[in-house]
């Protein structure tokens, strides 16, 4: 799961926006709520769900340059709604936010875009698939083959994505529980993208290849009151197996995970199965952030150390958080992505 | 113990309420003038900033349609999708108010009243019934829109801000945008503008807020005025504190003899002073608010007229200035009390209160030395100094040195007067004046500073007016000025105008680096208009003829000073093209350098530049008809045409306003000085009974004594005034020739205004007379028993 965006998107103008909107009185519409019985429909569910308050298209990639240098890449489009409907023009209550980043072992490049819905500046359509904000785009006939572009002040990228495996539904057929109190989201992933393309960095253009992981998630519920942040892991082992797991930090931590076998078959794991403990912290952007973790999943024999490729992968965006590529060693070896939020001070 | 010491300390003020009032009032009035002026400045600057922030003018580059037409919203989206980090602005008039619509999600930092991260504001701004932000007074002028009006001082005057979608609806603009702001940060890759939207043109940010730069001169002057007023107040405070400490020496000795540690005593005195300073500071800030509120409408009108800067006439209570007002009251008290506390700290435990006259005499010797030193520093800076800081040090040294020189100079004059005096009464008059001088000297210094400041500032303002109006006469020689928005319109004007106007003078210009500095090159048509009206500060013989033949250039004073280009120096106007300087002209208020070449040279070097502005010469009576013709047949909007007469009328009105402000400040500072004299005289009145009683006993009536006292005050004021004149002129010179040159790169010629000075002198005499009136009246009514009592109590 990618609770990542959950609060990112919620923290955006959202909670306040929602309150402000509710205060207006006459518009007493309510946002849709995720339901366990919902059966995800594709390609329709690749598109936006304006009746839900928040949603994201979240792609992370572990890449390698011609000289073997490892890189990380992020492309995210968040949607957040002031009211549960869509429309045309400036009055549309749908807001969009894009985050893009490239991480090298020595540097971290970040860009952010914001846009209103309804005027064509940003949006998502299901088929042919297109998600865009300004000149950033993730586009293709379907989710099998995509072109991904973004640019910032000091970086840009243009890469192609080819799916080599099936979509993975998290939780119960894509209904993913987020807290003991029952908050949930609809959540599926495409963790099997092959990537090849170019990164443009201040030193020049670098051809890269690697693997990417796309998360799709939508919901309307904020996290439980006591939850202050989360640590989210997407780990791809050299064996071909993958593990998605997260810890929601609160008075009592809540964890969930999905074991994805190399053939794409997924197993949801209950609260407590996935264990992640910080090993080393580091001062990043004025905060203490754990940049090295011990991750265990006893029932699959996983006991690994997860280490940031570049501990300075801080996303200094409207809602700041840490997001960057990681190396895995221990019982399993591999690469992955780590996201940490709520380390505000 | 603290309570006991405090009650002893406060007993002094209880016994001498006048001193307490002097101290509080001096500090309060000084703070009031200072913070009043600061409030005006802060308000004006906030208005510029708000204007720059809400309209993005100057701060950001802009994209507009070449013909000034609206931009379709689809073009905006196309630009965003091509990578351009631009933000749309819609604007228009809603009633009499300028309505600006913004998109807070894409607006570059600091634009507009809401931003991402400010939570609820943004939600309400973007959706639902909508919000409209404006100053409280502007909201009242808005027609009923059904939007939620939110009062905020951050928005520019007479401007309202709302969401772009609402603005489009309210202004009936459909899917149209007026202009796009270009964020300073752009992505690495984006398609060229010409490819995405060939009809649009991009203009660069102006680097900084031009209006603010232009008006800096005005604010600098106001600040100087405020500082001088405060200095005057400080002299009063220094006097009051010095006297109080002097009189409390005996009490201090007693307290220490009773066992109070010196350290604690001084600590408590500092606390006592801090409390007094705080009280006076609060009163002063409140008064300052009143001063500012009264003057601001005039200042606002001045700035609007002079520089086109829209400044609100309404005062907002800004923490910056009231805090700084309190801080300066505290700081002033520290400065005024430091000496007194220091000498108290060094006073031997058993020393008696030392004879006052002796202390004064010793201090006077030191005054002379310090004064001479400061004046020497001032002279040194005037000759060799460089930089704005040096200019301010010069001002400070001049003022303090001048003030400190006053008592010895007055002493000298009084001694001379004594030498010339015939008859016992006259001799006594001069001798007694000299005897009183130490007690009055601080008040007289205050008067000196007030008068010098007035002479200095009115000289500067009047010189500015003379220079500026004649400068406008030169520069606005043409009767009508027309700006075209496109090359086609320019062609239409050049085709139409010659049939109606006597002459059409195209104004060609291009921005260029000259001698490594930003500058503008102007191409001027060879026409009598320039020759007859432009006055050159310095020029080679037959400069205009040589210019017409392409044999050289004229440069403005800024370029002359900054690049050191004197007459005859070669100026490179284009690669490989250098021409000698033929003349230098005054260019007041322009922040950058300027070069004028003749039209032929300009067109040869810069063939791509098309003249978009024109000066039209015509019989003034036909201006209106010409305007109508250009509007109806040439499609030139009214706002693109300015006629000379209205500009001049406007500028004269502006100066009227400036004078209102200056006069008000003049009177206020003189009133402060008059107050200082009053307080000194009242204090002295009690102390000098032993001197007066014998004279009275010898046969001078109380009425006569009172008349002599009044006369003395006027004589001292007149002498002070006479000394203030050269000091004030030196001050004016320093402001015009040093500070202005360093700050803005141009020198204002200095003119003298003897009648003004005479009037000022009269005002100073009046202030002194008013101040002396009450003490004199009290003396004339003093019961003889009190005078007799002097003999009974005689030491």
Image: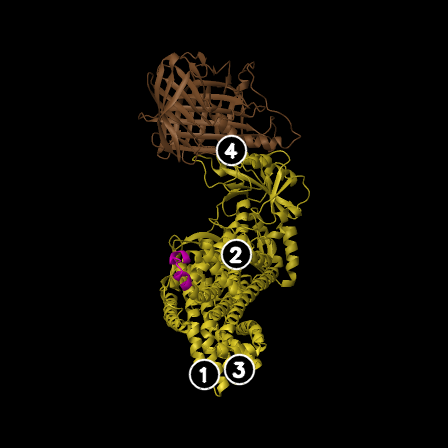
Badge 2: residue crowd in 10 Å (few <14, some 14–19, many ≥20): some
Lower position in the chain sequence, tag 3 or tag 2: 2
Tell me where residue B404 sits by quadrant: bottom left
Residue B544 visible to an observer of this rendering? no
Q: Are marks 1 and 2 in contact (CB under 8 Å)?
A: no
Q: Position of residue B258 (x, y in %)?
A: 40, 60
The colour applied to the residues of chain A in this rendering is brown
* Mark number, residue B696: 3
Badge 1: residue crowd in 10 Å (few <14, some 14–19, many ≥20): some
Lower position in the chain sequence, tag 3 or tag 1: 1
- Residue of label 4: A114
Label 2 chain ID: B
Instruction: Say what secondary structure mark 1 lies in.
Output: helix
Q: Position of residue B308 (x, y in %)?
A: 56, 55
Q: Position of residue B741 (x, y in %)?
A: 43, 62
Badge 3: residue crowd in 10 Å (few <14, some 14–19, many ≥20): some
**Closer to viewer: mark 3 or mark 4:** 3
- Residue of label 2: B279
Against B152, residue B582 (above or below) is below
Q: Position of residue B604 (x, y in %)?
A: 45, 54
Residue B564 is one of the magenta-drawn residues:
no
Q: Are marks 2 and 4 in contact (CB under 8 Å)?
A: no
The colour applied to the residues of chain B in this rendering is yellow
Q: Is residue B255 left or right of residue B681?
A: left
Q: Cα distance, mark 3 to mark 4?
A: 89 Å
């Amino acid at each position: 799961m990618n609770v990542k965006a959950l609060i990112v998107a919620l923290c955006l103008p959202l909670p306040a926006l929602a309150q402000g909107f509710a205060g207006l009185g006459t518009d007493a519409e309510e946002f849709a709520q995720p339901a366990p019985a919902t059966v995800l429909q594709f390609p329709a569910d690749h598109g936006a769900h304006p009746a839900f308050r928040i949603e994201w298209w979240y792609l992370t990639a572990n890449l390698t340059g011609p000289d073997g240098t490892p890189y990380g890449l992020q492309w995210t489009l968040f949607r957040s709604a002031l009211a549960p409907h869509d429309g045309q023009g400036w009055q549309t209550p749908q807001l969009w936010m894009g985050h893009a980043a490239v991480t090298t072992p020595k540097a971290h490049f970040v860009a952010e875009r914001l846009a209103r819905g309804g005027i064509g500046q940003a949006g998502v359509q299901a088929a042919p698939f297109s998600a865009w904000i300004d000149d950033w785009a993730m586009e293709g006939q379907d989710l099998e083959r995509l072109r991904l572009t973004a640019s910032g002040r000091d970086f840009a990228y243009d890469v192609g994505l080819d799916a080599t495996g099936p979509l993975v539904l998290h939780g119960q057929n894509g209904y993913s529980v987020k807290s003991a109190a029952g908050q949930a989201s609809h959540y599926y992933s495409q963790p099997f993208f092959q990537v090849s393309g170019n990164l443009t960095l201040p030193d020049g253009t670098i051809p890269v290849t690697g693997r990417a992981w796309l998360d799709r998630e939508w919901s309307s519920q904020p996290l439980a009151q006591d939850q202050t942040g989360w640590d989210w892991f997407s780990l791809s082992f050299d064996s071909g197996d993958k593990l998605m797991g997260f810890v929601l930090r609160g008075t009592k931590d809540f964890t969930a995970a999905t074991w994805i076998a190399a053939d794409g078959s997924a197993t949801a794991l209950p609260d407590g199965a996935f264990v992640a403990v910080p090993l080393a912290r580091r001062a990043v952007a004025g905060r203490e952030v754990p940049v090295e973790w011990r991750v265990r999943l006893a029932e699959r024999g996983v006991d690994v150390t997860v280490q940031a490729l570049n501990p300075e992968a801080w996303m200094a965006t409207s809602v700041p958080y840490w997001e960057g590529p990681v190396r895995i060693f221990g019982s399993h070896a591999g690469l992955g992505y780590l996201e940490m939020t709520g380390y505000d001070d | 113990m603290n309570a006991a010491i405090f009650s002893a300390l406060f007993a002094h003020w209880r016994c001498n309420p006048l001193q307490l009032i002097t101290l509080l009032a001096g500090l309060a009035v000084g703070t009031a003038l200072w913070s009043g002026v600061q409030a005006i400045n802060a308000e004006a600057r906030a208005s510029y900033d708000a204007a720059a922030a809400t309209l993005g003018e100057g701060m950001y580059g802009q994209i507009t349609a070449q013909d000034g037409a609206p931009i379709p919203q689809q073009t905006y989206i196309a630009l965003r999708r091509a990578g351009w980090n631009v933000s749309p602005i819609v604007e228009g008039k809603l009633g009499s108010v300028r309505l600006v619509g913004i998109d807070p999600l894409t607006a570059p930092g600091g634009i507009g009243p809401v931003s991402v991260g400010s939570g609820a504001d943004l939600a309400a701004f973007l959706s639902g019934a909508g919000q409209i932000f404006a100053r409280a007074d502007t909201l009242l002028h808005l027609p009923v829109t059904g939007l939620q009006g939110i009062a905020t001082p951050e928005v520019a005057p007479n401007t309202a801000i709302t969401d772009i979608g609402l603005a489009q609806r309210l202004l009936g603009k459909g899917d149209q945008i007026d202009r796009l702001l270009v964020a300073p940060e752009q992505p690495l890759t984006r398609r060229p503008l010409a490819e995405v939207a060939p009809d649009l043109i991009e203009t660069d940010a102006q680097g900084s807020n031009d209006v603010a730069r232009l008006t800096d001169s005005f604010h600098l002057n106001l600040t100087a005025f405020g500082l001088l007023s405060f200095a005057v107040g400080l002299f009063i405070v220094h006097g009051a504190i010095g006297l109080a400490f002097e009189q409390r020496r005996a009490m201090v000795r007693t307290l220490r003899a009773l066992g109070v540690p010196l350290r604690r005593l001084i600590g408590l005195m500092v606390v006592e002073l801090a409390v007094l300073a705080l009280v006076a500071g609060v009163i002063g800030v409140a008064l300052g608010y009143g001063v500012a509120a009264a003057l601001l409408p005039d200042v606002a009108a001045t700035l609007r007229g002079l520089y086109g800067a829209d400044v609100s006439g309404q005062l907002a209570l800004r923490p910056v200035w009231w805090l700084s007002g309190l801080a300066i009251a505290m700081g002033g008290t520290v400065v005024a009390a430091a000496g007194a506390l220091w000498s108290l700290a060094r006073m031997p435990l058993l020393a008696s209160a030392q004879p006052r006259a002796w202390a004064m005499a010793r201090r006077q010797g030191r005054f002379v030395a310090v004064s001479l030193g400061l004046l020497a520093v001032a002279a040194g800076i005037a000759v060799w100094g460089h930089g704005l800081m040096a200019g301010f040090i010069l001002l400070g040294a001049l003022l303090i040195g001048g003030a400190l020189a006053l008592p010895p100079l007055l002493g000298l004059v009084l001694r001379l007067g004594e030498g010339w005096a015939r008859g016992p009464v006259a001799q006594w008059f001069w001798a007694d004046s000299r005897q009183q001088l130490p007690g009055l000297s601080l008040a007289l210094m205050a008067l000196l500073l007030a008068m010098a400041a007035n002479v200095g500032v009115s000289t500067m303002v009047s010189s500015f007016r003379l220079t500026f109006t004649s400068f406008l006469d030169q520069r606005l020689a043409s009767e009508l000025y027309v700006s075209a928005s496109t090359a086609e319109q320019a062609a239409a004007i050049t085709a139409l105008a010659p049939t109606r106007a006597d002459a059409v003078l195209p104004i060609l210009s291009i921005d260029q680096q000259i001698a490594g500095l930003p500058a503008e090159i102007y191409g001027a048509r060879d026409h009598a208009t320039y020759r007859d009206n432009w006055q050159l500060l310095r020029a080679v013989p037959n400069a205009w003829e040589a210019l017409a033949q392409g044999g050289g250039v004229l440069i403005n004073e800024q370029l002359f000073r900054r690049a050191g280009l004197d007459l005859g120096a070669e100026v490179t106007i284009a690669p490989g093209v250098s021409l000698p300087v033929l003349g230098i002209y005054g260019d007041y208020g322009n922040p950058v350098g300027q070069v004028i070449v003749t039209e032929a040279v300009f067109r040869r070097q810069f063939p791509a530049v098309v003249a978009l502005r024109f000066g039209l010469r015509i019989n003034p009576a036909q201006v209106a008809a010409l305007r109508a013709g250009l509007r109806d047949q040439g499609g030139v909007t009214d706002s693109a045409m300015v006629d000379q007469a209205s500009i001049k009328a406007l500028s004269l009105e502006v100066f009227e306003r400036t004078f209102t402000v200056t006069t008000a400040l003049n009177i206020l500072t003189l009133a402060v000085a008059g107050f200082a004299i009053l307080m000194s005289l009242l204090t002295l009145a009690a102390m000098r009974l032993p001197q007066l009683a014998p004279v009275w006993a010898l046969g001078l009536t109380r009425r006569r004594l009172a008349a002599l006292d009044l006369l003395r005050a006027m004589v001292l004021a007149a002498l002070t005034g006479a000394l203030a004149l050269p000091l004030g002129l030196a001050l004016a010179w320093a402001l015009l020739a040093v500070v202005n040159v360093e700050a803005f790169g141009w020198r204002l010629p200095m003119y003298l205004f003897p009648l003004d000075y005479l009037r000022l002198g009269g005002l100073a005499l009046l202030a002194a007379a008013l101040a002396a009136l009450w003490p004199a009246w009290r003396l004339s009514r003093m019961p003889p028993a009190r005078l007799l009592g002097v003999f009974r109590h005689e030491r």
